Image (spheres, rainbow, N blue to C red):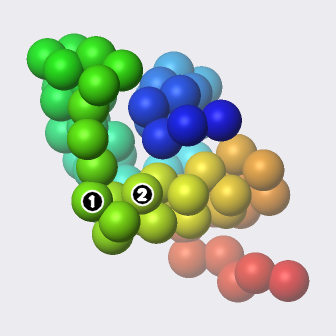
Amino acid sequence: MNTVSKIKEINDNYQDRLSEFEKNFIADNIARIGKWGDDTRFSEKQVGLVDRIYKERVEEGRAPGAKGG
């Protein structure tokens, strides 16, 4: 799954699991995707943050601030 797909899935289905920072980060990137579509480019740092959010909130179902196992 690519970064754009992860952001869309998080935005559409997992808003209730996000911290305020994560909500703002996802919303900002949804706006960018709205402008640039699937060609939206992301820095390595942005990709890493999306991957972390996706892993913790979607795959593991952890709430913000929860410790990993």
Disc marking residue 52: none
Residue at 53% x, 28% y: name it: 5
Spatial CA span between label 2 and label 1: 6 Å
- The image quadrant where one finds the C terminus is bottom right
Residue at 19% x, 39% y: name it: 28
Quick check: 27 left or right of 52?
A: left
- Assess whether mark 1 and mark 2 are in contact (beta carbons under 8 angstroms): yes
Where in the figure is residue 29, as x and y percent of width and height? 26, 37
Q: Is residue 39 visible?
A: yes
Q: Is residue 50 above or below residue 3?
A: below
Q: Is residue 15 visible?
A: no
Amino acid of disc 1:
Ser
- Tell which residue pokes out farthest to the right in this image: 69
Residue at 18% x, 29% y: name it: 32
Disc marking residue 43: 1
Where in the figure is residue 46, as x and y percent of width and height? 33, 60
Disc marking residue 47: 2
Provide the secondary structure element on which disc 2 rests. helix
Residue in the foreground of this view, choosing between 69 and 37 = 37
Q: Is residue 57 above or below residue 38?
A: below
